[in-house]
Image: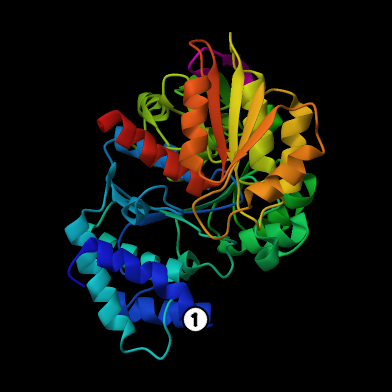
C-alpha cells in the first residue's frame, strides 16, 4: 500500500473475505508478531468492557494519567471520522505514516497465516505493534464487543479490569438476556486481577460479582450511593465520589452529560487500584476536568450538541441529560440509527419524554441504516410529535440550522456513524 487511505480501504474490505477462526488463532498471530509473551509490551494494561460508556472511561483514565505525568497508549472502538482515532499515544492519534507502516507489518505477517484476522482484530494487532514501539507506561484497551472472545482478551495479565454499564446491544452475538450479556463481558476478568464495575442492574451485578468471586479478584463496585452531592451547572457538573476505600469531595466534569459521573467514577476507582504514586488528588481533579470525548453530549458549535446514544440505555441516559439541561428556547432533535438496533423502543422513549418541539429523522450514511420510511412508521404511532424525515443527513442538519433561533438548542443523537458524519460536515462548513 502506498497511502494511508489505501490501507484504510483494505481494512474496510476485510469483512467481505475474512473467515471464521478462534481467539487462540488471533493470540497465536499476536505472539508471532510480538515475540515471546502474550502482549509484547511492557505497559501496565487497563482492560475495559461493557455496553455503554467504555470510550468515556478510556478518556477519563487517559486524561488523569497524563495529568499525573504518565505516558499512555489507548486503543478504542469505534472511530467517528478516521480509523486512526482508534490508536493513540498521549492525546494524539497515530500519524498517517505510522499507521501505514504498522499496517504493512501486520499485513506481511497475515500473508503467512492460514486465516485472515477480522476488521477489529487487524486494527488491534496494528495497535499492539505500535505500542511495542512507543512503550507507554500504561496501555488502555477497549473491547470492541463482548469480552470473552474479543481480540483484546488475548492479553493475559492486565493491571485492572473495568466493566461499564451492561444493557441490550449486539444480542445476536452476546445473548438475549442481561445475565447472558454480562457473562460475555465478564470474560475479561482474570484471576487475582482487580475488577471495577457499575451496579446498574441487579441481574448483571450478580453475574459480575460471581465471576469476580470465582477468579478471587478484588472488587470495587460503583453504585447509586457512590455518587453524592450532585450540582448541575450551565456547562459542567460537580459531584462527590464515595466508595468503601476512599472519598473525593467536589469533583468537576466539563460536560452536561449526567451519565458521565458514573463513567468518571469508574475511571477514578480503576486508577486507585494501580497504586500509582504520581496520581495525586490534584492530578485526578485536573484530569477529570480536562477530559474530552467527542460525540458524547459534545457542543460542536454554540447551541448544537452531538451524542452517540445508539441503543435503548444510551437514549435513556441522553434524554435524562436533556431533561435537566436548561433551554430558554425550543429543543430541536435529529435522530438516525442502525437497523440492527431496537429503534422502535428508542422512538418510544423519545416520544414519551415529550422533550422536543420538533424531531427530524434521517438516514445514516451506511447500508446498515434504518430507512426514512421505517423511521416515519415508528414515529407515526406518536402523533403528538412534530416530525419530518430526510434521506440525507446533511440536508436534515441544514434544515435544523436554518430553523434554529438564538435560544434554541439542536440535539443530534443516535448512531456513532451519524455523529461522525455531522462532526465532519460541521467542520467543513466552518472552514468553507
Instruction: Where is residue 290? Give x, y as percent.
Output: 36, 27
For this view, does 132 lie left or right of residue 172? Answer: left
The prevailing secondary structure element of the residues shown in magenta is strand
Answer whether residue 235 is magenta in the image.
yes
Instruction: Where is residue 186? Give x, y as percent.
Output: 63, 59
Residue visible at 69% across and 45% down in the picture: 375
Residue visible at 57% across and 15% down in the picture: 232
Q: Residues within 10 Å of mark 1 (few under 14, many from 20)?
A: few
Residue closest to the eye, 429 or 12: 429
Residue that numbered label 1 is attached to? 24
Quick check: 7 above or below 36?
A: above
For this view, does 101 lie left or right of residue 140? Answer: left
| Residue at the top extreme of this rendering | 328
Residue visible at 35% across and 39% down in the picture: 65
Instruction: Where is residue 199? Give x, y as percent.
Output: 70, 41
Question: Which residues lie in the magenta part?
Answer: 226-238
Instruction: Where is residue 201? Give x, y as percent.
Output: 75, 44
The image quadrant of residue 284 is: top left
For this view, does 215 lie left or right of residue 286? Answer: right
Amino acid at each position: 500500500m502506498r497511502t494511508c487511505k489505501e490501507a484504510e480501504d483494505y481494512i474496510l474490505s476485510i469483512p467481505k473475505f475474512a473467515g471464521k477462526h478462534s481467539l487462540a488463532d488471533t493470540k497465536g498471530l499476536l505472539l508471532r508478531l510480538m515475540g515471546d509473551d502474550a502482549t509484547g509490551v511492557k505497559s501496565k494494561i487497563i482492560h475495559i468492557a461493557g455496553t455503554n460508556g467504555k470510550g468515556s472511561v478510556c478518556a477519563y483514565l487517559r486524561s488523569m494519567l497524563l495529568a499525573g505525568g504518565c505516558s499512555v497508549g489507548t486503543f478504542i472502538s469505534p472511530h467517528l471520522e478516521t480509523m486512526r482515532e482508534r490508536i493513540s499515544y498521549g492525546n494524539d492519534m497515530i500519524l498517517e505514516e505510522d499507521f501505514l507502516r504498522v499496517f504493512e507489518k501486520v499485513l506481511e505477517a497475515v500473508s503467512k497465516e492460514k486465516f485472515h484476522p477480522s476488521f477489529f482484530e487487524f486494527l488491534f494487532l496494528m495497535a499492539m505493534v505500535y505500542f511495542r514501539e512507543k512503550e507507554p507506561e500504561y496501555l488502555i484497551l477497549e473491547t470492541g464487543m463482548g469480552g470473552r472472545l474479543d481480540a483484546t482478551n488475548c492479553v493475559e495479565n492486565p493491571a485492572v479490569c473495568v466493566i461499564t454499564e451492561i444493557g441490550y446491544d449486539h444480542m445476536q452475538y452476546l445473548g438475549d438476556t442481561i445475565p447472558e450479556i454480562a457473562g460475555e463481558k465478564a470474560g475479561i476478568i482474570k484471576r487475582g486481577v482487580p475488577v471495577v464495575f457499575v451496579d446498574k442492574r441487579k441481574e448483571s451485578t450478580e453475574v459480575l460479582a460471581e465471576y469476580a468471586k470465582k477468579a478471587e479478584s478484588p472488587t470495587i463496585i460503583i453504585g447509586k450511593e457512590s455518587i453524592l452531592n450532585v450540582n448541575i451547572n450551565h456547562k459542567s457538573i460537580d459531584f462527590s465520589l464515595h466508595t468503601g476505600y476512599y472519598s473525593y469531595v467536589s469533583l468537576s466534569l466539563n460536560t452536561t452529560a449526567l451519565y458521565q459521573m458514573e463513567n468518571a467514577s469508574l475511571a477514578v476507582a480503576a486508577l486507585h487500584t494501580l497504586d500509582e504514586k504520581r496520581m495525586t488528588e490534584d492530578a485526578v481533579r485536573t484530569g477529570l476536568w480536562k477530559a474530552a470525548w467527542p460525540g458524547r453530549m459534545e457542543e460542536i458549535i454554540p447551541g448544537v450538541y452531538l451524542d452517540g446514544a445508539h441503543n435503548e440505555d444510551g437514549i435513556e441516559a441522553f434524554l435524562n441529560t436533556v431533561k435537566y439541561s436548561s433551554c430558554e428556547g425550543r429543543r430541536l432533535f435529529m435522530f438516525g440509527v442502525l437497523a440492527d438496533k431496537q429503534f422502535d423502543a428508542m422512538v418510544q422513549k423519545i416520544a414519551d419524554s415529550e422533550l422536543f418541539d420538533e424531531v427530524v429523522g434521517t438516514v445514516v450514511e451506511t447500508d446498515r441504516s434504518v430507512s426514512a420510511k421505517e423511521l416515519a412508521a415508528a414515529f407515526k404511532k406518536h402523533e403528538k410529535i412534530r416530525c419530518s424525515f430526510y434521506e440525507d443527513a446533511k440536508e436534515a442538519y441544514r434544515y435544523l440550522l436554518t430553523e434554529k433561533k438564538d435560544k434554541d438548542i439542536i440535539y443530534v443523537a443516535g448512531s456513532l456513524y451519524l455523529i461522525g458524519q455531522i462532526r465532519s460536515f460541521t467542520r467543513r462548513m466552518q472552514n468553507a
